[in-house]
Image (spheres, rainbow, N blue to C red):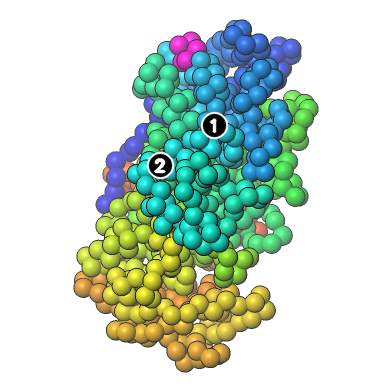
Amino acid sequence: MLKRGKSYTTNAKFMLHGGDYNPDQWLDRPDILIDDIELMKLSHSNTFSVGIFAWSALEPEEGKFTFEWLDEIFSNIHSIGGKVILATPSGARPAWMSQKYPEVLRVNGSRVKQLHGARHNHCFTSPVYREKTQIINRLLAERYGDHPALLMWHISNEYGGECHCDHCQNAFRGWLKEKYNHDLKALNDAWWGPFWSHTFNDWSQIESPSPIGENAVHGLNLDWRRFVTDQTISFFENEIVPIKEITPDIPITTNFMADTFDLIPFQGLDYSKFAKHLDVISWDAYPAWHNDWESTADLAMKVGFINDLYRSLKQQPFLLMESTPSAVNWHEVNKTKRPGMHLLSSMQMLAHGSDSVLYFQWRKSRGSSEKFHGAVVDHDNSPENRVFKEVAKVGETLEKLSDVVGTNRTSNVGILYDWDSNWAINDAQGYGLKTKRYPQTLQQHYRTFWEQDIPVDVITKEQDFSSYKLLIVPMLYLMSEETIARLKDFVANGGRLVTTYISGIVNEHDLTYLGGWHKDLQEVFGINPVETDTYYPNDKNYVTYKNQSYELKDYATVIDVHTAITEGVYVEDFYANTPAVTSHVYEQGKAYYIGGRLEDQFHRDFYQELIQELGLEPAFRVKHGKGVSVQVRQDQENDYIFIMNFTEEQQNVTLESSVTDLITGEELSGDLTLEKYEARIVLQR
């Protein structure tokens, strides 16, 4: 693989360490603010996100602005050589605004206007809210745009949710008119209007989906979710007008999320669209380490998948904007990180492409819902407790890794993730309502490469496929004609393509393809999937592949083979001894179809053959057992290798080349013992 030069996402050529700092909660305690500066130095922190929920402190009354306290915070952080990530405060508006301008309050799907409170509950379409955010953002940019401590802009916070008010209804209708070229028949055709007599004869009849109204028109539901993404981006674009005008050279981000319990990409917005509007991708990672339903290594694999998705969105380093050094306060069980896990989990973020380890939060709140959420500084205000010392150790480690900043990695393997398809299949009233699990299915296919230290890009359908030797497209329920054509070209030009059951079922309007599987897919794969069998939880079958038997759960596809080769067959049921896994040479490439949801060992064995055939290799070879992960970041001269033990036992590994430990300076080769949760970061020139 070709190595890349460095790509710096900010003007800081060092690892960022610090996090969300909320001095506006402590303005009546100047002694606390003084302590913060000393504790920042002791924790080896250098970067702080400020102002995220500070609108009430910045504008306590309409038109009355109080920036003096923020001036002091900037000065204090700058005095210790620190950097500020300045946030716009739109994530939580002040009470005076909700009272005077109730249109800024969201309306839920049942058409009930929400009361003031909580956060992330404003209307993205409200002209008043858009005007007010621009006013305060302009003042922030004018006041701090030239400050030497300003590193980047943090726009709002964790965008999400939707509003169904009259402003949003009108905006949705306008969006639809543009999408369908003011052709109502085209919309009705796309939404399959005659079903249940749901044909519209005037644009004014269209409303957003509602639990007390229309919710069974899948084309409407899908377009609404797309609109919510586009309208959120529109609000974001409105927010940054004065910022781009006044500070065009200061990079902009907003913090993406993941659904924590399953650790899958956030479902509420299509980040593949949002990423195009950001200078830097950042995200908030809160894995439930030490849980009782999966191994530490299994969870680490899922973290790696999310990292590789968000890194691949812009093919450059990203930022870890929020994490916890200890516990969170909103899991069902809020278990704290065990000794060593904070350093290990931080190094994993770096290993997959982060140039930061930042926290929510710097100091624990004294009251309200986040008073027990983990923080660098606890209520004891002490640098002597375990968590603070572990944070300081991370900070010391990061100070030795400045050369890693800006590095990336290349990959010969791509896995395709698609928000549209996930929305559509989740909306489908078919298959197994609890077993669709599209993102989790992709993680199953990702696992083998993570276990073998082979780098993977988790890409989206708009991205270039041509650089990959192997493209894995599991369970892509929604495939447009354009996507099908691009996959066909990929195989025709020599690529290896893998897809699975429940793929290519509907087009971009969530309308099924007629006449069997799409003709181009039949041509590429040499088959026609004719029936999908859905299993109850206790049902199972088996597939024989290469003289081995593998358990099958949830789904099995009955396949009509045209010109493909049968690689595996079902063992039981009415389709026993019929094809379950096929391969097909198409022009210069080859396409594989996996008809059922098979156990992990099948994926290991199946992909091992492709790994060998395609010559896929780790960027740096380390012999190790299960639960150890090796990830590599590269520049044109160096490999920066992260060797991480995601198990509760000692692990012996063997280095096949000599390296230098970047933390201790030791020269290492041959056998090496990793303690529980230990990470070693080494350099090979």
Q: Which residues are magenta?
A: 137-143
Residue that protrudes farthest toward the front in the picture: 201
Coordinates of residue 165 in the picture (x, y in percent): 59, 35
Please identify the quadrant where the N terminus is shown: bottom left
Coordinates of residue 615 in the picture (x, y in percent): 31, 68
Task: Assess disc 1: are there few (<14), some (14-19) or many (≥20) residues with their C-alpha within 10 Å of its C-alpha.
Answer: some
Label of residue 210 in the image: none
Coordinates of residue 26 in the picture (x, y in percent): 71, 17
Q: Amino acid at mark 2?
A: Lys
| Nearer to me, 482 or 184 | 184
Task: Assess disc 2: are there few (<14), some (14-19) or many (≥20) residues with their C-alpha within 10 Å of its C-alpha.
Answer: some
**First-in-chain label (1 vs 2):** 1
Q: Is residue 272 left or right of residue 613?
A: right
Whether residue 610 is visible: no
| Residue corresponding to mark 1 | 167
Q: Is residue 139 magenta?
A: yes
| Residue corresponding to mark 2 | 177
Q: Amino acid at mark 1?
A: His
- Residue at (40% x, 35% y) in the render: 277
Helix, strand or loop under label 2: helix
Q: Is residue 477 above or below residue 57?
A: below
Whether residue 115 is visible: yes
Residue 403 picture quarter: top left
Q: Is residue 232 above or below residue 655?
A: above
- Residue at (65% x, 31% y) in the render: 119
Q: Is residue 499 magenta?
A: no
- Residue at (42% x, 56% y) in the render: 190
Coordinates of residue 27 in the picture (x, y in percent): 70, 13
| Nearer to me, 246 or 484 | 484
Q: Is residue 457 above or below residue 86?
A: below
| Nearer to me, 119 or 153 | 119
Characterize the magenta stretch by its predominant secondary structure.
Answer: helix
